Image: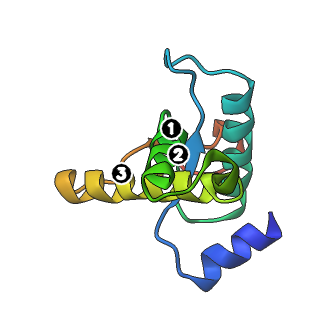
Amino acid sequence: MDAICSIIAEWSALDLYVGLPLHLSGVEGDAAATARAWAKSVAERTTVPVRLIDERLSTVQAQRGLHASGRSTRQSRSVIDSASAVIVLQAVLDQEQRTGTPPGELVTMTADDGREQS
């Protein structure tokens, strides 16, 4: 957590996006609960807005792109998460450019922690 907060400060981040791994049906499972808890932990330690972003199908898109570039599934294993993150971030940037507002679900604090609610 300290490393993440240090990177946020070092790069003067404006927002932090955390992938929300939903099931294809849109239902949240254990992985989504873990992502929410992690995002809240970061939000509690930084002033940068933390937003959850739907990452459904990003791995599939990344795998297709890597395969199209000539990489086998075996060759892609070490970079698939990074490629997926690039796809999610590009979608965030595209949506923000189109709409003028940051996409995703803003992670908010509880009323008793002293931080502003949204």
Residue drawn at x 68%, y 40% is 35
Quadrant for the N terminus in the image: bottom right
Q: Which residue type does callout 2 highlight?
A: Gln
Tell me which residue sits at (60%, 50%) in the image: 72
Residue 105 in view (yes/no):
yes
The residue identified by callout 1 is 60
Residue 75 figure quarter: bottom right
Q: Give the CA distance from mark 2 to mark 3.
A: 16 Å
Separation of marks 2 and 1 at Cα, in angstroms: 5 Å
- Vertical side of 105 occupied by 92: above or below: below
Q: Is residue 69 left or right of residue 102?
A: right
User: Of residues 61 and 54, which is closer to you in this image?
Assistant: 61
- Between the C-alphas of marks 3 and 1, the distance is 14 Å
What residue is disc 3 on? 91
Mark 3 or mark 1, which has the lower sequence index?
1
SS for callout 1: helix
Q: How many marks?
A: 3
Amino acid beneath label 1: Val
Which residue is more in the foreground, 87 or 62?
Answer: 62
Q: From the viewer's perspective, is the residue at label 2 or at label 3 nearer?
A: 2
Tell me the kind of residue under disc 3: Ala
Which residue shows up at 56% across the image and 16% down it? 27
Query: Residue 18, position in %: x, y?
Result: 58, 50
Task: Decide: few, some or many residues near mark 3? Use Cα within 10 Å; few <14, some 14-19, many ≥20.
Answer: some
Q: Whole-percent x and y of residue 94?
A: 27, 56
Residue annotated with mark 2: 63
Closer to the eye: label 3 or 1: 1
* Residue 26 placement (x, y as % from top left): 49, 19
- Residue at image location 48% in from the left, 34% down from the top: 57
Where is 104 relative to 14, above or below?
Answer: above
